Image (cartoon, grey):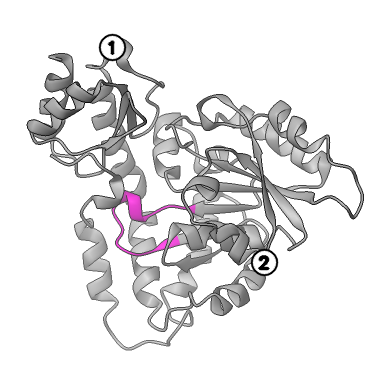
């Protein structure tokens, strides 16, 4: 009964079918028919012109997106617990050729205009200090909290006023859209670039980077090649992304994962550390309680010394979810 991560979930059958259907001769790299459909698919999804490229990992998606917004002498403002700070092994500095991450505060791993301003206002406008070039927010956040459209709009206004680009790390973007029950464009806000997560949501090995300025995608294609991420059989990555987006599989899968998380959260009462708005549940548990749950066959990660994180997925089994909810309520 696995609740370690949605990364551990099975590949959705429709994704496998799409990959098998792609197993025919076509142009290599990103010149195939499937790759050439990505721009159209995401333009339809977001209701405005955009361009999209596939990559193999979320780390590459975030870093290639940011590399279009940030010069090597610049910086990215992000939350101090953002994935790009805590879980990408220094990849942003590598891909951005030395650009810094400026760490801001915020409840639930979310930023707001005041926190961003407090981080960048002390920076002098001279060559002796690294200048901010972009803001990166995570939708949903590292604690599973979702930015409302109004919150993103406020961050976007500040970014425009300060001449900053806006990147959205959407590893769990689908879960945010499912919770907010709004169009994808509203959940992305005034982003310049979006890392559109697929792997946590039923794909095997493909993510999409969506650029709302198509010219930025042209730059990113060169950077993708230089970074070693231009796969020769790119049609198999494009097939995965299209299988998720066309027909709204991405949203159906996220709704299933969110519903499973909500069921577990309902059994946690005041043990919950954060509201459950996506597919992550953070629960206050003693070491003995965690050992008892593991003894019953539940897999999950510890979260510090007195808590645990449970992550549901598109295919979390109903019986496993119900069993975990009963086990937590019985502690």
The answer to which of marks 2 and 1 sits earlier in the sequence is: 2
Instruction: Compare residues 254 and 115 and report the one nearer the observer.
Output: 115
Mark 2: secondary structure: loop
Q: Quadrant of residue 256?
A: top left
Taking the magenta stretch, the answer to whether it contains residue 197 is yes
Q: Picture coordinates of residue 306 (x, y %)?
A: 32, 23
Q: Is residue 72 left or right of residue 178?
A: right
Instruction: Compare residues 110 and 178 and report the one nearer the observer.
Output: 110
Question: Which residue is found at the position 55% from the left and 73% from the top?
Answer: 224
Disc 2 residue crowd, few under 14, some 14–19, many 20+, Cα 10 Å: some
Per the model, the C-alpha gap separating discs 2 and 1 is: 46 Å
Question: Which residue is found at the position 73% from the left and 63% from the top?
Answer: 72
Taking the magenta stretch, the answer to whether it contains residue 143 is no
Identify the residue position indicated by label 2 in the image: 97
Identify the residue position indicated by label 1 in the image: 269
Span highlighted in magenta in the image: 196-207
Q: Picture coordinates of residue 185 (x, y %)?
A: 56, 43
Up the image or down, 34 lies above or below 161; here it is: below
Q: Picture coordinates of residue 33 (x, y %)?
A: 43, 78
Question: Which residue is found at the position 42% from the left and 32% from the top?
Answer: 144
Up the image or down, 98 lies above or below 234; here it is: above
Q: Picture coordinates of residue 12 (x, y %)?
A: 22, 56
């Amino acid at each position: 009964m696995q609740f370690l991560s949605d990364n551990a979930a099975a590949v959705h059958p429709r994704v496998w079918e799409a990959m098998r259907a792609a197993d025919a001769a076509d142009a290599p790299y990103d010149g195939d028919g499937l790759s050439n459909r990505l721009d159209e698919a995401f333009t339809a999804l977001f209701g405005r012109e955009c361009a999209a490229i596939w990559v193999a990992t979320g780390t590459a998606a975030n870093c290639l997106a940011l590399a279009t917004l940030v010069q090597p002498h610049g910086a990215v403002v992000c939350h101090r617990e953002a994935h790009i700070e805590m879980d990408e092994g220094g990849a942003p500095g590598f891909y951005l050729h030395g650009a810094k991450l400026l760490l801001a505060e915020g409840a639930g791993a979310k930023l707001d205009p005041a926190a961003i301003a407090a981080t960048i206002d002390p920076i002098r406008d001279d060559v002796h200090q690294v200048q901010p070039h972009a803001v990166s927010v995570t939708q949903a956040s590292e604690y599973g909290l979702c930015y409302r459209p109004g919150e993103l709009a406020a961050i976007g206004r500040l970014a425009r006023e300060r001449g900053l680009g806006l990147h959205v790390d959407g590893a769990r973007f689908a879960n945010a859209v499912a919770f907010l029950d709004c169009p994808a464009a509203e959940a992305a806000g005034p982003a310049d670039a979006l890392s559109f997560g697929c792997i946590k949501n039923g794909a095997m090995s493909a993510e999409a980077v969506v650029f709302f300025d198509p010219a930025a995608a042209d730059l990113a294609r060169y950077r993708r090649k230089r970074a070693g991420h231009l796969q020769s059989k790119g049609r198999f990555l494009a097939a995965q992304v299209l299988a998720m987006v066309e027909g709204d599989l991405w949203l159906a899968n996220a709704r299933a994962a969110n519903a499973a998380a909500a069921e577990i959260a309902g059994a946690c009462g005041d043990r919950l550390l954060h509201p459950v708005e996506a597919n992550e549940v953070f629960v206050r548990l003693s070491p003995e309680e965690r050992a008892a749950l593991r003894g019953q066959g539940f897999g999950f990660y510890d979260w510090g010394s007195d808590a645990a994180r449970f992550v549901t997925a598109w295919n979390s089994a109903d019986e496993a979810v119900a069993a975990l909810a009963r086990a937590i309520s019985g502690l």
